[in-house]
Amino acid sequence: ILVVGAGAFGGWTALHLLRGGARVTLLDAWGPGNSRASSGGETRILRATYKDRIYTDLAARALPLWQENEKNWGLRLFHQTGVMWMADEDDALERAAIQHMRDAGLPFEELSATEAARRYPQINFHGIRWALREKNAGYLLARRACQAVLAGFLAEGGEYRLAAVEPGAMERGALSGVKLSDGSTFVADQYVFACGPWLGKLFPDVIGGRIKPTRQDVFFFGTPVGDSRSTEESLGVWLAYGTHSWYGIAGNESRGFKIANDTRGPAFDPTSGDRVPDAAALQAAQQAASAGAQQS
């Protein structure tokens, strides 16, 4: 089996296929967790608060898999800080997620705005009605995790190559092979394409414009010297989904206080798009950080 794309989906797919007895080759154009990939970057949140049940179930299944493989590899990739959702007038997502998490047996707690403000005095809870805190959730070291999955895949006998691909012709309902960027051709019994935002370009007739990559700027702010309120032990991960879907990760292994707006941004080319931080997005993040911080 040939798996194209060594991000979160491709890397884990290749590893599970290998463990299932298949002979697997994994390809990636720039390497696992590279800066162009959707799975790159410092961190990603692992949480189960979703409006659609399928994503809650996926998260519930993913957590023990991460913990099991962390132990096998002797690495710490997941930081169990808890994840706090701050609900305003529109709390449909949080209300739906409560039943999903209850059905999945995931521990959580509902906090009144007063209780949340007492527990997290560094946050300004103005306009927040209540909070939902997932106890087992937290964040993953994204880039490092992708690289760890590849290392585990190689250690268990998988084959990896750095190469971009172009699908070959379809013959009698089957793919004839793929052309690699080094000029060679690779033929397998089965193919898995886990190429994220590039899938539309690889298969324009099948997928075309169904996948629309967009830009979301992510910022890491320095915190005041000696300020323990901004550590993952004191705060951890928080999300405030309203008109603008802001989220943040305190701590980040001392990499800075991560803040980002998860609202869909403008269309973006993941291969050649300009990744210089947008001045307007930076200003908005600074304003959000200021408005959300309880002044001491």
Image (cartoon, rainbow, N blue to C red):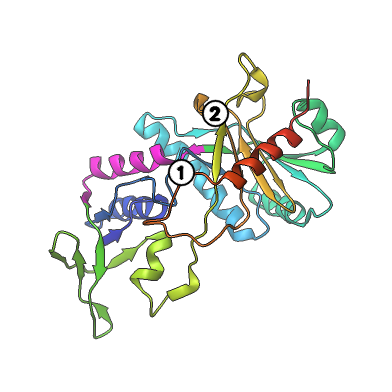
Amino acid type at image mark 1 = Leu
Mark 2 residue element? loop
Left or right, 25 with respect to 257, comes to left
Magenta residues (range): 140-161
Q: Mark 1, residues whose alpha carbon is within 10 Å: few (<14), some, or many (≥20)?
A: few
Residue located 66% across and 28% down the image: 235
Residue located 51% across and 62% down the image: 267
Say whether residue 192 is magenta: no
Q: Mark 2, residues whose alpha carbon is within 10 Å: few (<14), some, or many (≥20)?
A: some
Among all residues in the image, which is located at the extreme front? 279
Left or right, 287 with respect to 202, comes to right
Q: Quadrant of residue 271 in the image?
A: bottom left
For the question of whether residue 271 can be seen, the reply is: yes
Q: CA distance from mark 2 to mark 1?
A: 28 Å
Residue 30: image location, x then y, percent: 29, 50
Mark 1 residue element? helix
Residue located 54% across and 47% down the image: 278
Residue 64: image location, x then y, percent: 50, 41
Residue that label 1 marks: 65
Quarter of the picture holding the C terminus: top right
